Amino acid sequence: MTGSESGEKKKSMSENKFMGLNKTQEKKFPVKNKALAVLGSPGSGKTTTSIKLALELAKHKKNAVVVFCDPFTSVLPYVTSAGTAVETSLGTLLTAPGITQTDILKACVPIGQTEYVSYLGYRAGENLMAYPKVTRDKAVDFFVMLRHLADFVIIDCSTIFEADPVSIVGIETADTALRLGTSNLKGIAYYQTHMPMLADSVFHVDKHYKAISMLKPWQEWEAVSQQYGGVKYTLPYVTELEQQYDEVSLPDLLKSRESLKYTAEIKRIVGDVFGIGDNPADAGQKAAQKAGQSEDSRKTTRGAISFKLPFGKSKGEF
Ligand SMILES: Nc1ncnc2c1ncn2[C@@H]1O[C@H](COP(=O)(O)OP(=O)(O)OP(=O)(O)O)[C@@H](O)[C@H]1O
Ligand SMILES: [Mg+2]
């Protein structure tokens, strides 16, 4: 290790975590969508997908801040390695008398594997009772400032977003949303319950991207897609991903053959939503083709499914 390398290593955590965000500001580039809200039914993979999307952006040297809105079960303790210094919680940030860009930067939790991704969320053991109520104005200020600090903002919304002002404002201020639904009746039930709450034009539902998440080999795709009003992406169930989650190693690359389709879909989403990829215009399509998983082929291969869920084939309400 050279002298300068060891000096670099000795930099404090708080210095390091500014690095990626500072790089951001050096070059301005045209951006299709800057902030994405990730929504979906319980356990549909919102947190996992948010992190993987941020990591894909990092591969293109774009920094991304992932905001874990969930105040009901703090996310930081299960997505950061033991011993990670978390100086300020999202709760503290959002209930302080005023929020500054420096406060936000201080609250960003760097992750070891890449300097381009940082996290913001609640700390271990925190709950809503620990803080005064987060006001709408504070949440708006927060998201507006964050947009100026980061290249991209990914908002991992609480499942029950209606009970969490940060998620609600996050969906409202984001440029678009990715809605994840599982291929089962629980996923459908969630959307039937929650979509009416997003009917207001401030949530711009017409611009949302939709994905079936955690699709298992025996699960129906086509009928479920129709229930969700048409779905552009399919994120398959990948055992390695579940293992990464349990081992707090989501920032690592997926290596299994089973994960190829999942990774291709993540690239495709990043290409389509953020316009970031090897060739943004068709990055997503190419990635899917490489993994042998174009939307058409998926439809064809799903023709012979033995197990049928009891969904009507007609288009759903949402
Ligand atoms: N594509 C996938 N393949 C396999 N397992 C997955 C996949 N996506 C997510 N998981 C697993 O599903 C579980 C729930 O994932 P995650 O926490 O990301 O969902 P969530 O929607 O954020 O949940 P919550 O509603 O609790 O916020 C985790 O164990 C995770 O490893
Ligand atoms: Mg989650």
Image (cartoon, rainbow, N blue to C red):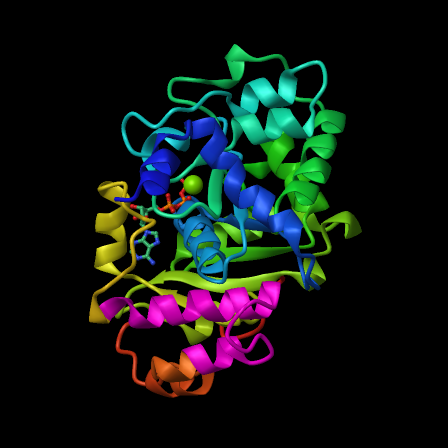
Q: Is residue 189 above or below residue 277?
A: above
Q: What is the magenta segment's predominant secondary structure?
A: helix
Q: Can residue 175 be seen in this view?
A: yes
Q: Residue at x 53, y 36 (%)?
A: 18
Membership of 262 in magenta stretch: yes
Q: Which of 62 and 40 is in front in this view?
A: 62
Q: In which quarter of the image is residue 280?
A: bottom right
Q: Is residue 123 above or below residue 169?
A: above
* Position of residue 159 measured from the top left corner of the image (x, y, whole percent): 50, 40
Q: Is residue 309 visible?
A: no
* Position of residue 295 measured from the top left corner of the image (x, y, whole percent): 46, 81
Locate the N terminus by quadrant. Answer: top left
Q: Residue at x 49, y 64 (%)?
A: 211
Q: Which residue is drawn at 37% across and 83% down?
A: 290
Residue placed furthest toward the front? 3
Q: Which of 258 and 59 is in front in this view?
A: 59
Membership of 49 in magenta stretch: no
Q: Which residue is drawn at 72% across and 18% down?
A: 98
Q: Give the range drawn in magenta.
A: 258-287
Q: Which of 167 and 42 is in front in this view?
A: 167
Locate the C terminus by quadrant. Answer: bottom right
